[in-house]
Amino acid sequence: MAGSSLTRQRLDRSRLAELAPSIKQPGNRVLDAGVGIVHLGIGAFHRAHQAVYTEDAMQAKGGDWRICGVSLRGTEVRDRLRPQDFLYTVIDRSDGADAVRIIGAVAEVLYGPDDPAAVISAIARQTIHVVSLTVTEKGYCHDPATGSLRRDLPDIVNDLDMAKPPRSALGYLVRGLKARMDAGAGPVNVISCDNLPDNGRLLEGLVRDFCATAAPELGNWLDAHVAFPCTMIDRIVPAATADGLALAAASLGLDDQAALLTEPFRQWVIEDKFTAPRPAWEAAGAQIVSNVAAYEAIKLRLLNASHSAIAYLGYLGGFKTVAEAIAVPAMHAFVRQLMDEEATPTLEIPPSFDVDTYKDNLVARFANPTLAHKTWQIAMDGSQKLPQRLLETLYHNIRAGKATGAVSLAVAAWMQYVGGVDEQGQAIDVSDPFAEQLAAIHTKARGDVIGIVSGMLAMEPIFGAAEAQPPGLEIILIDALNQLRTHGALYCVANYC
Ligand code: CS2
């Protein structure tokens, strides 16, 4: 991202009085509030989603719910926010107009590796009632196909030795919970906000598994003191860019090095399962429900599945952004068919949920021309995303003898993408925890489609054990990958429709 404009003052508390009245501000109810949340993984998504809900909840109902954010992987967020008193701009962008607001819900940002003890003692503070996480799928250090803890990962090997400084989110969390138990600091809600099915239960299982080895004394305490509600989180928040910072600077008349662009839409469904106080998130529009599973599945298999299909097929077809790709009529029709014909029949739709309107809104959100949401960004970490987004639908439909043409083409596009070369022969920067193994499968197969597909299907963490894969899976994917490599992504997309 480009540096700041030399002529502009930097956003901070002392500048709030200068802002135009059209720019919504946090106000003293937020800025004077105490900290009640520790959030692990304070990236763009959290700052444009949970932090905004929390700000609105404090504005509506008060409470000491400001956020102590923690970065585990880099100092950038802290270094950009600190000179601004942790204030930043969120611009809701649509074709019609931009809505600009300043968020004040973040009170501080810690960089874990600088001072792990500070993070652990923050989690153990009596005034903290919520520990939430957005650490991305791979941050859970689990086997995506089975949900079990990957004890082979170097960070987990390190963290299971409680005498060592932690490296993984689980390592920080378990040490923090143990410190909380030791300090008698009382119950806490631990809230996963990542795009994983049953994210609360998954996290609880991983924490308990981790504790069984590293801190068995914590097991009973967890039963009585910690709730792990499941959540469905939704808001499209592209990674920050220099263009976004320039737009914020022009809107504010101030330099903001931490500004974010997002869409007007946002949704947060949270399981009503808490052991400690929480912000009045429902006053900010969050839905607190008894069961989140149906909402999670709908979102993962419709929104995120379409996103991943657009990311791989679109990237291979030469599209840099989701909006560019979905503007092509064949891609639009393909995504609609993927949702209507293949994914929707696998879902249990709650009676009050209007799934057709939901899908209409999804394609409209994808088409938002003001958000440059990169296909490359969504394509990242496909090995961690594929099972819940595409493979559940594919496996279900193979077993039920239903249509699989669109979903299998999307999975084949992922297989092709991770080979690291696009349809113009240009190298792809594949970012994935399994990138090396996936590239090695391509190298070994030397262009043989059967070799590529069988090598991929042998990746158990992604596709599950051979006996758990549906019969015919290999043939279906060989056919799809063959078509893709022979005719190219766009032809296949158009041909499918
Ligand atoms: C996207 C999601 O990057 C991705 O994988 O599919 O981050 C998506 O934008 C959000 O889940 C929308 O809520």
Image: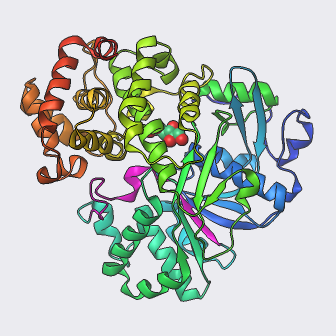
At x 22%, y 39%, the residue is 398
Left or right: where 441 falls relative to 379: left
Q: Is residue 199 above or below residue 178?
A: above
At x 59%, y 75%, the residue is 188
* 139 drawn magenta: yes
Q: Is residue 166 visible?
A: no
- What quarter of the picture does the N terminus occupy? top right
- What quarter of the picture does the C terminus occupy? top left
Q: Quadrant of residue 390?
A: top left
Q: Quadrant of residue 59?
A: bottom right
Please tell me which residue lies in front, 227 or 100. 227
Please tell me which residue lies in front, 275 or 288. 288
* 341 drawn magenta: no
Q: Is residue 290 above or below residue 348?
A: below
Q: Is residue 138 visible?
A: yes
Q: Main secondary structure of the magenta part?
A: loop
At x 44%, y 32%, the residue is 307
- Which region shows up in magenta? 129-150
At x 67%, y 52%, the residue is 51
Which residue extends farthest front?
351
User: Where's residue 270, x and y in %?
Assistant: 59, 59
Q: Is residue 494 above or below residue 436?
A: above
User: Where's residue 60, x and y in %?
Assistant: 83, 56
Left or right: where 235 falls relative to 440: right
Applied colour scheme:
rainbow
Numbered circles on residues, count: 0
User: Where's residue 407, x and y in %?
Assistant: 31, 31
User: Where's residue 197, x and y in %?
Assistant: 42, 54
Please tell me which residue lies in front, 313 or 336. 336
Q: Is residue 113 above or below residue 99?
A: below
